[in-house]
Image (tube, grey):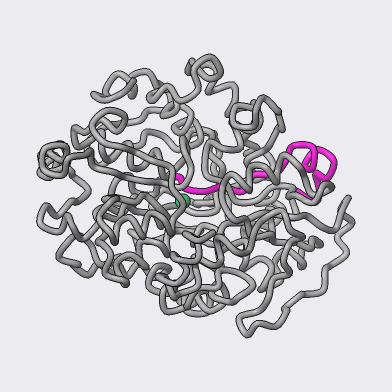
Amino acid sequence: MTNRRKFLSVFSATLAGTLFLNACGNPPEKGGGADGGTASAPVADAGLETKTITLGYVPIVEAASLVVGVEKGFFAKHGLEVKLAKQASWPAARDNVVIGSAGGGIDGGQWQLPMPHLITEGIITNGNKVPMYVLAQLISQGNGIAVSNSLKKANLRVDLTPAAPTILGFPKTEGRKFRAAHTYPNANQDLWIRYWLGAGGIDPDKDIELLTVPSTETLQGMRNGTMEAFSTGDPWPFRIVRDDIGYLAALTAEMWPVHPEEFLAVRADWVDKHPKAAVALLKGLMESQQWADKAENKTALAQMLSSRAYFNTPAAVLEPALKAEYKLGADLKPSNDPKLGPLYWNSDRGVISYPYKSLSLWFLVESLRWKFHPGKLDTIEQAKALVDKVNREDLWRQAATELGLPAGDIPKGSSRGKETFFDGIVFDPENPQAYLDSLKIKR
Ligand code: CA
């Protein structure tokens, strides 16, 4: 508690408070409008099995379209009142979905992958299997790796090779290993930084210390020289640059353009009991994602998310993150390429929202690469079977068809095809073993 107060006094902006003071497990907060007032749209009678669902979210740009759906009335239009419940952390979200909304938890919400798959198998829930369905992708990109200003001279960038001697030399120069952090193990941010380090010839399990640390503690560590890198989602990297704590070494968009990021997943029992409501949820989400994706809506979106009821973060911090106005590298080179920013709907690889099995499979294959879950997830066949069970492309297609999306926006198959990383490594979902074989650093 003392530490928490100390961090809060250091970080006068309010994001830290958002993450730590609005504890989860409380009754879901009612969404407020950008002006702090409520903006509940009348819920249409669409003949659904239920009119409500409780979804958890974490206040980072990944959650934007869920907030848009509530505030702009896109969910209500399709007959569903979505109650958004801010989660204090990823472990809190995990525990709340195990409880379910009937017990004061959540029915589903925003997830890093492969959390829904692992929860389904009980792998991260003490053997407690809670089957879940991945219904849609919420966002692509919008994440990055920030590095402390103490490493300005080495200018770490997406290709770490030139800076590798500095990192590997830490025990000699600093008397300890280089330290990096993420906020939840074995999921997105852990996987992005592992990929980045591995591609640069650095073994994340042997050459450095890779730790799970709350965001505010990581920022404090970067300030006082005990932590060097942080793998996280916006607006955190923006805060780090704005507060002159560090710089943006790599955007995940540079590592893997249009990569899968975070997803909407809901308890399978909720979806099975309320199939029409699940499709209505998807229809509302698709319209929200289209709205959030439009350049002309970014300012309004930043205002909406900034409100006390949601991110409780200044719009001035959120807006550049949403508009992809980055400053990259130690020299803070301005980059204003929307293609590198958060993507909610359109992309060079088609519609973002579709829950491709091929993209989810990568996260489980990466779990095999690092042997995260020995005895529980050991083979490509197990990974494929798990994705087949959890990803519901059929519901997405049904919602898209009912919404009248152009045929070109509705993918026909389960694979987005081959994926190419910045270092030339290719993930072919038809041959994950070849991908594993091509990686130099693995367990
Ligand atoms: Ca993320």
Residue 312, located in which quarter of the rendered image?
bottom right
Residue lying at 56% horizontally and 38% vertically, measured from the top left: 412
Q: Is residue 245 above or below residue 414?
A: below
Quarter that holds the N terminus: bottom right
**Magenta stretch?**
260-278
Q: Quadrant of residue 98?
A: top right
In the image shown, does 419 or 405 lie closer to the viewer? Answer: 419
**Which is nearer the eye, 131 or 140?**
131
Q: Nearer the viewer, residue 322 or 406?
A: 322
Q: Is residue 81 left or right of residue 222?
A: right
- What residue do we see at 37% from left, 33% from top? 418
Q: Is residue 72 above or below residue 79?
A: below
- Where residue 236 sits, quadrant-wise, is bottom left
Residue 65 image point, x, y percent: 58, 62
Q: How many marks?
A: 0
Q: Nearer the viewer, residue 195 or 258?
A: 195
- Residue at the (44%, 65%) spot, across then down: 7
Horizontally, residue 1 falls left or right of residue 326, namely: right
- Per the image, is 401 magenta? no
Q: Provide residue 32's location: percent of width, then percent of height.
A: 68, 76
Is residue 215 left or right of 42 when viewed as pictured? left
Q: Quadrant of the C terminus?
A: top left
Visible residue check, residue 389: no
Q: Residue furthest front?
A: 2
* Up-down relation of residue 432 to residue 282 (above or below): above
Is residue 265 in the magenta section?
yes
Residue 95 visible to an observer of this rendering: yes
Eyeballing the image, is 65 above or below 120?
below
Task: Give the x, y percent position of residue 414.
Answer: 54, 34
**Can you name the residue that lies furthest to the bottom here?**
35
- In the rendering, at what x and y percent does residue 354 appear? 56, 46
